[in-house]
Image (cartoon, rainbow, N blue to C red):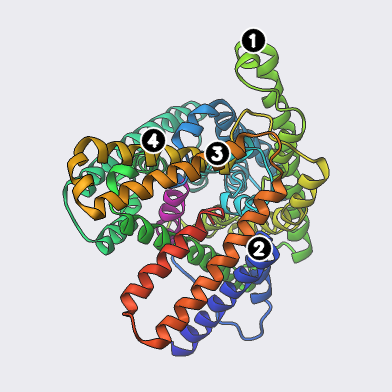
Amino acid sequence: MHYNLLLFLVLLSGAFFLIILAQKLRISYPLFLVLAGLVISYIPGIPVVSIDPDMIFLIFLPPLLYEAAWYTSLNEFFKWKRAIGLLSFGLVICTSSIVAFAACYFIPGFTMPLGFLLGGIVAPPDAVAAASVLKNLKVPKRVLTILEGESLINDASSLIVFRFALVAVITGQFSFHQAALSFLVVTFMGIATGLVVAQLIYLKHKYLSTTANIDAAFTLVTPYFMYLLAEQFHFSGVMAVVSGGLFLSYRSHEIFTSGQTRLQTVNVWSTLVVMLNALVFILIGLELPVIIKGLQGYSVAEAWRYGVIISLIVVLVRFLWIYPGTFVPRMLFKRIRQSEANPGWKGPFVLSWAGMRGVVSLAAALSLPTVINQAQPFPHRNLIIFITFVVILVTLVIQGFTLPFVIKAIKIQEIDPVASDEKEEAGIKLRLIHVALKKIEDSYYLEADHNRFINGLRSDLQRRVTVTSEKLQSLLGDDVEESELEFYNKTLKEIYHVQRSELYLIRKEKIFSDAAIRKEETQIDLAEARLSPHRH
């Protein structure tokens, strides 16, 4: 037991080092994790670790979906709801159907329910994989928003397809009309359940005062409440988590009034998501030897061939869906042509090529039961898991490695009239400073003249208005070069570096308390974080 636990911790630490390396090389870290899973399977004497398939969904899916929902902008989501809906529902159903027919055609012994099961597993692209590739590249905000919204909802829709296909495999019965009606019921009731739980959680956060630690811990159990309650009534737990997460994300400014709580919660969730991603790929690495041995009459070469064929199908179907889905509505409806800028061919191409599969597909595959009807082995379970792993491997390796080069080669540019991050940040900061000044003038006018601290605050805010206004005017000018902003950010990072070094010297002098030093260090960290992407 101790040896296995130590080995597992070593593998987990190795996964963390790979993530660090991927971030240094600006490569999608799920790519390194899937390769690590493959390498782990070839380590001699590696112990076999099996986990109850029913626990896979319960452990991994609620937090992963909740985190994705939390970082999805509800305003942007509704702005591009048509594109997101076409990808999240239309493309998922199309991909699942084509994969089902193809699998039945060239994989001996495959039935249509098994084909839909496989299709539902491999249909959804992975948000983490795409985000980790695109965060350091210049991609239009429209593309990023659609990818984030798609990856959130298509996880839910694909897992509902997976659920109905699984029932069909187990029972041997399938009715399209009954399935379609059940699909609508479990989806909408799942959404309703998630919103009800979210409202209760919202009231708890807002009216029951707790510490930052308790609030952060409570967010960890929230997605499990949503998921389990919905599943208890046989609704979609996935849709419950997604809808509830979107609701709470939109009301987060009311829930977390303390900056410390918000920072702590973000850090907790960032750590959790990285660990969950690493754990899933380690699990597949530990189970791959058993999966390969139990391919049920298929050779490893055949399984690889099937996996590559399915990979090519999901990539091709995405292209064949996205381009008509982008331009046909524009041709049919004048309102769309008037309200949305022409996306051209480059944006849809990036959307098509960014369809990398990842942790949700792998978790779904691992959740397949080992037996059905109490004694009968689940048909082709190991083959389905192996094909899923190959699809993830192929899409991450080929698309993950080449996506940055594709984006640079086609020289994609922003086509929507949106402000740069620097302009938006300066504009927001200016609004907030004006509000603070107005509050002082309206409520503390007399105190500002007699209290030197209030007077100093007012002077500092007035100075910041001048500095921020000048920065915003410079950014609004046409003569601002990107190299100037890059050099400015580089200078700030160097300043923050020497400030941290000075804090280290101050700590050695033992003049000031560690608490005061840590507080200043946090302020520097926050200032530096504003120069970089906040997610993943």
Element type where label 2 sits in the image = loop
Element type where label 3 sits in the image = helix
Residue under pointer 2: 296
The magenta region covers 54-68
Give the residue type that dot 2 points to: Gln
Q: Give the number of the disc on residue 472.
A: 3
Residue at 59%, 32% in the rendered image: 418
Asked which quadrant contains residue 374, the reply is: bottom left
Give the residue type that dot 1 points to: Lys
Q: Quick one: quadrant of the C terminus?
A: bottom right
**Who comes first in sequence, dot 3 or dot 1?**
1
Secondary structure mostly seen in magenta is helix
Q: Residue furthest front?
A: 449
Looking at the image, is mark 2 or mark 1 nearer the viewer?
1
**Who comes first in sequence, dot 3 or dot 2?**
2
Contact check, label 4 and label 3, Cβ < 8 Å: no
Give the residue type that dot 3 points to: Leu
Contact check, label 4 and label 1, Cβ < 8 Å: no
Residue under pointer 4: 186
Q: In the visual, does 288 lie left or right of 197?
A: right
**Who comes first in sequence, dot 2 or dot 4?**
4
Residue under pointer 1: 334
Q: Is residue 59 magenta?
A: yes
**Who comes first in sequence, dot 4 or dot 1?**
4
* Residue 443 image point, x, y percent: 20, 38
Q: Is residue 187 visible?
A: yes
Q: In the visual, does 3 lie left or right of 493?
A: left
**Label 1 environment density (alpha carbons within 10 Å; few <14, some 14–19, many ≥20):** few
